[in-house]
Amino acid sequence: MNGPASSLREKFLHGSLAITLMSILFGFLLGGVILLVAGFNPLEAYWVIVEGVFSRPKYISYVIIYSTPLIITGLSVAFALRTGLFNIGAEGQYIMGALTAAAAGYYLKLPILLHVTAAVGLAVLVAGLWGGLAGWFKARFGVNEVISTIMLNWTALYISNWAITIPSFGRQGTGKTYEIQPSAQIDILGEWKRTPEGIAFLREHPMLWDILKSPVNLGFICALILAFAVWYTLNRTTLGYELRAVGYNPHAAEAGGIDVKRSIVVSMLISGALAGAAGAFQVLGVSHRIATLAIMEGYGFDGIAVSLIGNNSGPGCVFAGLLFGGLKYGGSKIQDVMGAPTEVINIMIGIIIFFVAMPKLIRLILNFRERRRRT
Amino acid sequence: MTSIDFSHKAVEMIDVVKKFGDFVANDRISLTVHRGEVHALLGENGAGKTTLMNCLYGLYHPTEGTIRINGEPVRISDPNVAIRHGIGMVHQHFKLVEPFTVAENIVLGREPVRFMGILDMAEARRRVGELSSRYGLSVDPQARIEDLSVGSQQRVEILKALYRGAEILILDEPTAVLTPAEIKELIGIIRNLTKEGKSIIIITHKLHEIKQVADYCTIIRRGVFIDRVAVDAVSEHDLAAKMVGREVSFSVPKTEAEPGRVALSVRDLAVKDNRGIFAVDGLSLDLHYGEILGIAGVDGNGQSQLVEALMGLRPAAAGRIMLGERDITSASPREIIGDHMSAIHEDRQKRGLVLEFDVAENLILETYRRPPFSRCGVLSHQEIYRFGEHCIDTFDIRPQQATLTAKSLSGGNQQKVIIAREVSNNPDVLIASQPTRGLDVGAIEYVHQALVEQRDSGKAVLLISFELDEILTVADRIAVIFEGRIIGLLDASEADENRVGLLMAGGGP
């Protein structure tokens, strides 16, 4: 009955999208109040963030680089949530993916394309099994996935830290591993931009040079492809149908002939694989190595926030991840420029999630506005 | 006997329209209730009765139309405003605080207090006692809600409304959860209330209760006003026809069964329930093609566990289930469905439907893996929604929109979705467990006809029901289940209420 245009309009005005946009607005408003209380001009601070994100091509590419792992861990959490599982373990799966990618990138000797494929493939496999393990615990023994994934997060962290102490892998005394081989790196023109010809060419093209100053890599493109793949799998395949049915109502799914236990394992496996891909792209494209972690880096935990803001959908995670990355990168500049605390950014993100999680309140406000307009 | 004051219109709803998006739930409905009148609001499940009353009680806001209370036009923005206008509502699902006492529940929100806001429970009990004796609603003010029967809880809800000064009382499906004795009491209470000048609106789809208690009746169908009648002037049949929009038969027309060979054979089946106790304990039965075998019995005698074991949802502890030539005792649900046995489960919202899925998605819950709905693991939305539209037409599912979530359908239409799915599967054996629970006459007739049609096309039907009437009208043979065992098997022609009733209570033949 409704055309796509009018349904999009509907979404904007009344649906989940309206709630998200209102939540973001509230996040900025309340963040501004906090800045004001702390003695800073919020408009100035927000201008610094906007400038810090958009004023140079380099900044934009940094935002994209910041966003890439967040988008993918967001997809990981979203995929599990859509199928009725709360994957807190994206963090640990990310670590396992990063570790595997670093090891494969360093030890394997393969031609360029094959090397990247092998490193990503292995990372996805290991992280998938890591997530699938939690799924299997739930299906076989009824262990809540929240508990098991939290424990697996710490297990992953210590496995990773231990691996770095292996002499052939970790550079002794630095707490870091050796850099992966160039054939495994996914930086865009990473080699060439350091050659004399490259430098000479880039001097002539300042815009391109500016962009290439940041570690631009193929990760973001992969994240977009994965976002589409998640959307497609959930909405257009029998597998997605099964997983969603189990997520909504396992009793009816079981009566309909769907193997509920298998679905739980498969869902956690895919969710884990996605988080692992995030870790792999980060290693292959940005860090090129892993380091000893005192605490968790938080990419997986941020994924939960990205998923919630993105309404647990593939495209939603892309936008939420970009927002998140922009706030993190641009927000870091209010400290340098104004001396304002970057914690404000985290508070803002918290407020946004707070409102996203309270759709009823937002609906109330939206309805109130509408009623006033009508009378 | 009536105490209607025709000069005083307590409630007037004029041309009320309520839309939800594109869906019109109430389309220019008018309703008038006089002081001292019992007014029945009759309609099928999903006709828009509750929506209309929610507009009156301030839970919804009408899109268009006027509401007048005692002649004054009012705008009821929320239930508090409704209460101020003297409107009280007793919902189908009670809204009581279980661990609180009766008196505490009744005064909740308007507690009598002594100075400095100290709760005066003695005063509360006194007032509650006074109210209950005045209207003949006997209930102990100091009893805890969780210890009360459903009938008593309902009385508490009515008292709560009266305590808040209700002059107009809306009762939403008040008899749905009551035993016959409790229904009689309720009718007495309603009479007392009207004598005191209260006006009562009863939302219902039970015709004989309307005949018993109501003075006037407004009938709505698919959100449209159909008629307002004086109850004395019409028969139950007239009411049913107006409600459903066609003639309704209370009996199921069917020919003699022509049973064929055995379709499903169960031998010495034992099944444990969740507590590990044998709920089904040595049960044997044979179901033939071309017959409806009814399993009569009081709730809790192993019926649920039997169905779950048959469909592979619960392991059999002992015994054997043969579907034709195949042993399906330990087969998975998917294998059993693939072997052409399907079930309409007793709890449609738990086992039957994924409420968040839309109608079309629910219709393919068992067939999504097969062409044309999917090929190589990719769903064909075009085929899925085409099939959805087809089922909506064939099985008359309303509203006619395949993209609506199952959650938004009425109970009867949810059941139609399930029947559409199971019958479209073309099973050799159809198990129908409590298939008409909570449905109105039109929908019940529909379900019974579907079962008989299934039988007439040569399929086997196993009907499990706690309603003896249903078993007696629909089944060809009747097996009585008691404590997990079949303790009697008789032909429908030789069965009557007394014989089967005695067996159901565990009495031997």
Image (cartoon, rainbow, N blue to C red):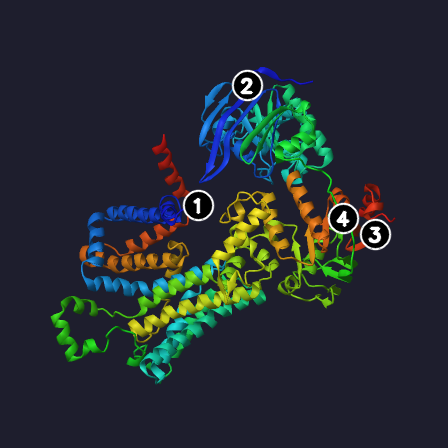
Spatial CA distance of label 4 from label 3 is 15 Å
Looking at marks 4 and 3 on the same chain, the residue that comes earlier in the sequence is marked by 4
Q: Quadrant of residue A287?
A: bottom left
Extreme residue in the top direction: B7
A132, above or below B172, in the image: below
Q: Is there any visible trace of residue B440 in the rendered image?
A: no
Q: Are marks 2 and 4 in contact (CB under 8 Å)?
A: no
Spatial CA distance of label 1 from label 4 is 43 Å
Task: Write down the residue under mark 2.
Answer: B9
Spatial CA distance of label 3 from label 2 is 57 Å
Task: Write down the residue under mark 3.
Answer: B488
Looking at marks 2 and 4 on the same chain, the residue that comes earlier in the sequence is marked by 2
Image point (53%, 64%), residue name: A263
- Looking at the picture, which amino acid does disc 2 mark? Lys
Q: Is there any visible trace of residue B46 in the rendered image?
A: yes
Q: Are marks 4 and 3 in contact (CB under 8 Å)?
A: no
Could you tell me which chain the residue with mark 1 belongs to?
Answer: A
| Number of numbered discs visible in the structure rendering | 4
- Looking at the picture, which amino acid does disc 4 mark? Ala
Task: Write down the residue under mark 4.
Answer: B475
Which one is in front, A172 or B70? B70
B503, above or below B329, in the image: above
Image position, residue A125 (x, y; %): 44, 74
Which one is in front, B42 or B111? B42
A91, above or below B225, in the image: below
Spatial CA distance of label 2 from label 4 is 49 Å
Image point (59%, 16%), residue name: B6
Looking at marks 3 and 2 on the same chain, the residue that comes earlier in the sequence is marked by 2
Pointers 2 and 4 within a single chain:
yes
Task: Write down the residue under mark 1.
Answer: A1
